[in-house]
Amino acid sequence: MFGLLSRRMATSAATAPCRCTMMSPIIAPQFQHLLPSHGHASFTPPQITVRHATKKAGGSTSNGRDSAGRRLGIKVWHGTPAKAGGIIVRQRGKKFLKGENTGMGNDHTVFAKVAGVVQLERSAKNRKRIIVNVVPELLREHSAVQ
């Protein structure tokens, strides 16, 4: 019933930040009999308050996800002993190439085939490539004796 008798007053967020009021300055003739003393100006219809949002709507975002690091890189450095079957380099692509006594896995991981000391040297064909070799411990001991 109040919807027919009243209209909503337009207010902006700057003038009324938390509520707006509904008042009726004009009463329709078919409802004049409901007023006390038949339409005198002393009657004021009840006020209805409407709540507004106090926070802006959050929405969704397509960001906010990240994957863990892949732990790539050189695991055993030049001049360091490596175990047989141990990983020397984990990489994406073929920056490090397999050399003597080393192998390369499906994911381009360079690993030692024998126990020994790691040697890293630049490729003669392509200076950006590094060849990984493993010198076996027996050969190293033999060359140190001579």
Image (spheres, helix red, strand yellow):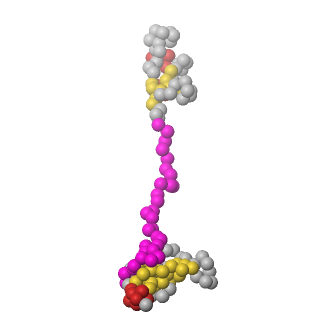
Which quadrant would residue 25 be assigned to in this image? top right
Asked whether 57 falls inside the magenta stretch, the response is yes
The stretch in magenta equals 55-84
Whole-percent x and y of residue 136?
A: 41, 87
* Quadrant that contains the N terminus: top left
Whole-percent x and y of residue 139?
A: 41, 89
Specify whether residue 95 is in view. Answer: yes
Left or right: 120 with respect to 125?
left
Relative to 75, is 142 above or below? below
Q: Nearer the viewer, residue 15 or 5?
A: 15
Which quadrant would residue 117 be assigned to in this image? bottom left
Across the whole image, how many numbered discs are drawn on residues?
0
Whole-percent x and y of residue 38?
A: 48, 11
Specify whether residue 30 is in view. Answer: no
Q: Which residue is located at x 57 percent, y 79 percent?
A: 122
Whole-percent x and y of residue 83?
A: 37, 81
Residue at the front extreme, as displayed:
146
Magenta: main secondary structure equals loop
Asked whether 138 falls inside the magenta stretch, the response is no
Q: Which residue is located at x 51 percent, y 74 percent?
A: 92
Q: Which residue is located at x 62 percent, y 84 percent?
A: 125
* Quadrant that contains the C terminus: bottom left
Q: Which residue is located at x 45 percent, y 80 percent?
A: 118
Relative to 136, is 29 above or below? above
Q: Nearer the viewer, residue 32 or 136?
A: 136
Relative to 145, is 70 above or below? above
Q: Nearer the viewer, residue 49 or 14?
A: 14
